[in-house]
């Protein structure tokens, strides 16, 4: 990442993804905030990423640990058509 205040879109998207997985440093938060204020495309990406993270976070409770045998057979039958 560059040392200046303005970062590239590539760096900004990387920070957006990292932000959803871990806490950013104060320096990185500021750089990202500054970039998002100036770049509508990265700002849109950040909003979409937040929506996706929210939707995916609720899936863990809905997905069974093991797939039932009947579901496996149905998938195999559909694939073999």
Image: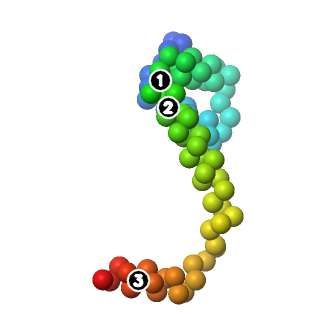
- Residue 17 coordinates in the image, percent (x, y): 55, 38
The mark lying in front, picked from 2 and 3, is: 2
In the depicted structure, whether residue 56 falls above or below residue 10: below
Which mark is nearer the camera, 1 or 3? 1
Q: State whether residue 11 appears in this view.
A: no
Query: Which residue is disc 3 drawn over?
Result: 76
Task: Answer left or right for 76 relative to 43.
Answer: left
Q: Measuring 56% from the left and 46% from the top, which residue is drawn there? A: 52
Q: Earlier in the sequence, mark 2 or mark 3?
A: 2
On-image quarter of the C terminus:
bottom left
Tags 1 and 3 touching, CB below 8 Å? no
41 horizontally vs 62: left or right = left
Residue at label 2?
44
* Residue plotted at (53% across, 87% down): 70
Marks 2 and 1: in contact by CB < 8 Å? yes
Q: What SS does tag 2 mark? A: helix
Task: Say which label, 1 or 3, has the lower sequence index.
Answer: 1
The answer to whether residue 69 shows anywhere in this view is yes
Answer above or below: position of 75 versus 38.
below
At label 3, counting other C-alpha atoms closer than 10 Å, the crowd grade (few under 14, some 14-19, many 20 or more) is few
Q: Is residue 51 above or below residue 1?
A: below
Q: Which residue is mark 1?
A: 40
Residue at 58%, 43% (x, y): give it.
51
Farthest residue toward the left? 81
Where residue 36 sits: x, y (%)?
A: 54, 22
* Residue furthest top as drawn: 4
């Amino acid at each position: 990442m560059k040392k200046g205040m303005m970062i590239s879109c590539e760096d900004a998207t990387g920070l957006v993804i990292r932000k959803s997985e871990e806490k950013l440093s104060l320096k990185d938060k500021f750089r990202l905030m500054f970039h998002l204020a100036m770049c509508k495309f990265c700002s849109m990406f950040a909003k979409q990423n937040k929506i996706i993270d929210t939707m995916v976070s609720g899936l863990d409770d809905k997905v069974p640990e093991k797939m039932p045998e009947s579901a496996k057979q149905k998938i195999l039958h559909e694939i073999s058509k």
